Amino acid sequence: MFGLSEIAVILVVVILVLAAKKLPELARSAGKSARILKAEAKAMKSEEEKEKGEEEKAAGQAAPTPQVIHGEVIAPSVVADTTSPTVHTAAKPDSARPHSQNQQNQQNQRNQQN
């Protein structure tokens, strides 16, 4: 009787004889499918990298550093509405506050000169 390898050879020969007209069309179809699959895989990879970059960028913006303006610390607050950010002015530490009226006058004069 026939073995497994002989049956496989006979099936391949039968398929080649009966489907000879369809083979070029099948090969083209397989090539197109492979190109589409490759393009989709590349698009998914670039999309994942883009999302990863956006996440890292958002993480970097989540904790902004305070800004120093004219000796005062202004800490930007993180709000849900990014179109109109709010800014809160931090109070001066006790060591930066003038203790007497004379010191306050001197500080006001320095501020006016700047």
Image (spheres, rainbow, N blue to C red):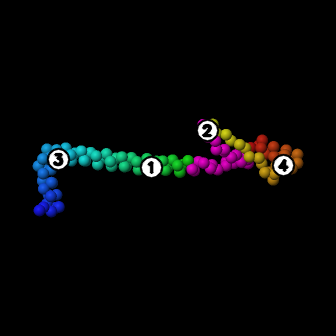
Q: Is 64 inside the magenta-drawn segment?
A: yes
Considering the numbered disc 2 on the image, is that residue within a helix, a strand or a loop?
loop
Label 3 crowd (10 A; few <14 / some 14-19 / many >=20): few
Identified by mark 4, the residue type is: Pro
Q: What is the x, y in percent for residue 91?
A: 77, 47
Q: Residue 37: x, y in percent? A: 32, 48
> 50 or 10, which is in the foreground?
10
Q: Amino acid type of disc 1? A: Glu
* Circle 3 residue: 23
- Observer-nearest of 68 and 66: 66
Which label lies toward us, 3 or 1? 3
Point out the stretch of residues depicted in magenta.
Answer: 59-83
Residue 94 rendering spot, x and y as whole percentages: 81, 51
| Residue at image coords 78%, 41% | 112
Residue 98 has which mark? Answer: 4
Q: Residue at x 25, y 47 (%)?
A: 30
Assign the C terminus to one quadrant of the image. top right
Residue under label 1, please give it: 48
Are the residues tagged 2 and 4 within 8 Å (C-beta)? no
* In this rendering, position of residue 35 left or right of residue 12: right
Residue 81's disc is 2
Callout 1: 10 Å neighbours few (<14), some, many (20+)? few
Disc sitting over residue 6 in the figure: none
Q: Nearer the viewer, mark 4 or mark 1?
A: 1
Instruction: Tell me the kind of residue under disc 3.
Output: Leu
Estimate the spatial distance between the alpha carbons at disc 2 and disc 4, rounded to whole Å.
Answer: 38 Å
Which of the two residues, 1 or 56, is positioned nearer the viewer here? 1
Position in image of residue 43 (x %, y %): 39, 46
Q: Amino acid at mark 2?
A: Asp
Disc 1/disc 2 C-alpha distance (Å):
26 Å
